[in-house]
Amino acid sequence: MRRGRARLRTVALIGIDGSGKTTQAHRLADALTAAGRPAKYRRNASGRRWLGRLAHRLGRPDAQRLVGRDGVLAVESVLRWLAIAAALLSCLLTGRTAVMDRYSACQYASIRANGGQRWERLARAGYRLFPTPEVTFLLAVDPAEAYRRIEERGTDHETMGWLTAADTAYRALPEYPSFVLVDAGRPAQEVTEQIQAYLGTWLPPSPGTPRGDGDPLTAQARP
């Protein structure tokens, strides 16, 4: 749904690891700024990768063996909450659009994928303070393709089981009908064009980028 010419305060890009969130969030922040709508990229990480590295340094195979599943979920929830709060405050003070690489839905999906649903109620109570973004893009990609990308970049590792569980968790969230689905299995430039076409109210058209009600991405948006 288009938002007229109202100010675009927050855009969130969510999805499983390997879906291209970071690449697309950087590109979107740059495009908005170039269009005269200053934006700031914000990476709202949960600290899971950092916690995993700490576990390895301490001789444990993974974070859960270090602090337990509940400990991992507690640390993730707190660190992501702090990151989102800092991002929103910064953009409020500067007047910039916050382009969020991950948002609260990512934490809810992580909790579900970890089988810790009882934590979700607590997380939602804390994250309720945060405004709903004007647009939330769910970058949808096959878990097998996400796994291939993660292995190719070589900076971290995820199991197919985790990626599949996370993909299922995103689609089961009650917020899912409000997400704008993006086919993130396509080449990165095509994904960029889809995202920017949907945000046509705030971005000028790029050469060759489809616009209007017939745009393939807009057709997937749900009010």
Image (spheres, rainbow, N blue to C red):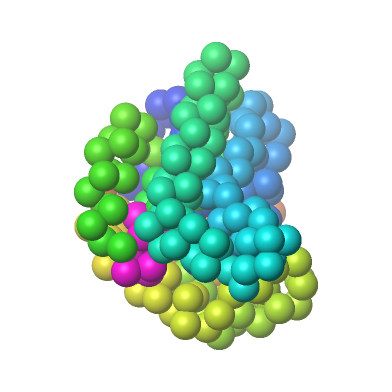
Is any atom of residue 136 visible in this view? no
On whether residue 113 falls in the magenta region, the answer is yes
* Residue 85 drawn at (x, y percent): 47, 29
Please state which of residues 67 and 184 is positioned toward the viewer in this rendering: 67
* Residue 213 drawn at (x, y percent): 38, 56
| Residue at 67% over, 56% down | 54
Please state which of residues 90 and 208 is positioned toward the viewer in this rendering: 90
Please state which of residues 218 and 24 is positioned toward the viewer in this rendering: 24
Extent of the magenta region = 108-115
| Residue at 56% over, 56% down | 48
Q: Is residue 219 above or below residue 133?
A: below
| Residue at 68% over, 46% down | 26
- Left or right position of 205 against 113: right
Question: Which secondary structure class fits the magenta region best?
Answer: helix
| Residue at 52% over, 83% down | 160
* Residue 122 drawn at (x, y percent): 26, 44
On whether residue 166 falls in the magenta region, the answer is no
